[in-house]
Image (cartoon, helix red, strand yellow):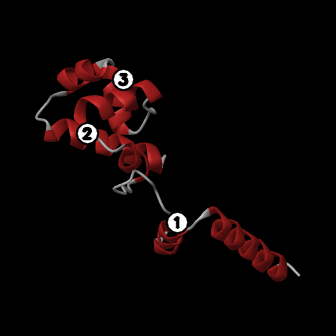
Amino acid sequence: MKILNDIGHKIKCIRKENNLNQVQFAKSIGISQGNLSEIELGNSNPSAETLISIRTQYNVNLNWLLTGVAAEDGTTYEDEFEKRLIEVFRNLDDYDKNEIIEFIQLKMNLRSK
């Protein structure tokens, strides 16, 4: 339930940052106060509609809300290596991208032997 607790805690923080009580915040995102209470306590998952409503009403980065990581381009990376690889890879032309993919596949095949 760690992920649920984290999301619930973040939603509670968003609510408190906006100086709203549960009734006010729940109404603004289209759910009941009881539902919000269960989400904040980590007993319930927010629906996709609720997450989108929070995103829209309070300009919250959904990657941050769901994973705790917010990249400027909205992308979530496993670690710094993956981030660097993706950034460099995006700047290559298609020929070079295919060459890199073939190299990685070759490297993986050699490791599995």
Report the front residue among 11 and 91.
Answer: 91
For the residues labelled 1 and 2, say whether their Cβ atoms are less than 8 Å apart. Answer: no
Using the image, tell me which numbered label, if any, was put on residue 35.
3
Q: Residue 65's x, y, as percent?
A: 36, 45
Identify the residue at the far left of this view.
Answer: 19
Residue behind mark 2:
12
Mark 1–mark 3 Cα distance, whole angstroms, equals 39 Å
Using the image, tell me which numbered label, if any, was put on residue 86.
1
For the residues labelled 1 and 3, say whether their Cβ atoms are less than 8 Å apart. Answer: no
Who's the residue at 39% across and 57% down the image?
A: 69
Is 83 displayed left or right of 24 in the figure?
Answer: right
Q: Residue 40's x, y, as percent?
A: 33, 36
Report the front residue among 73 and 70.
Answer: 73
Looking at the picture, which amino acid does disc 3 mark?
Asn
Q: Secondary structure at mark 1?
A: helix
In primary-sequence order, the first of circles 3 and 2 is 2
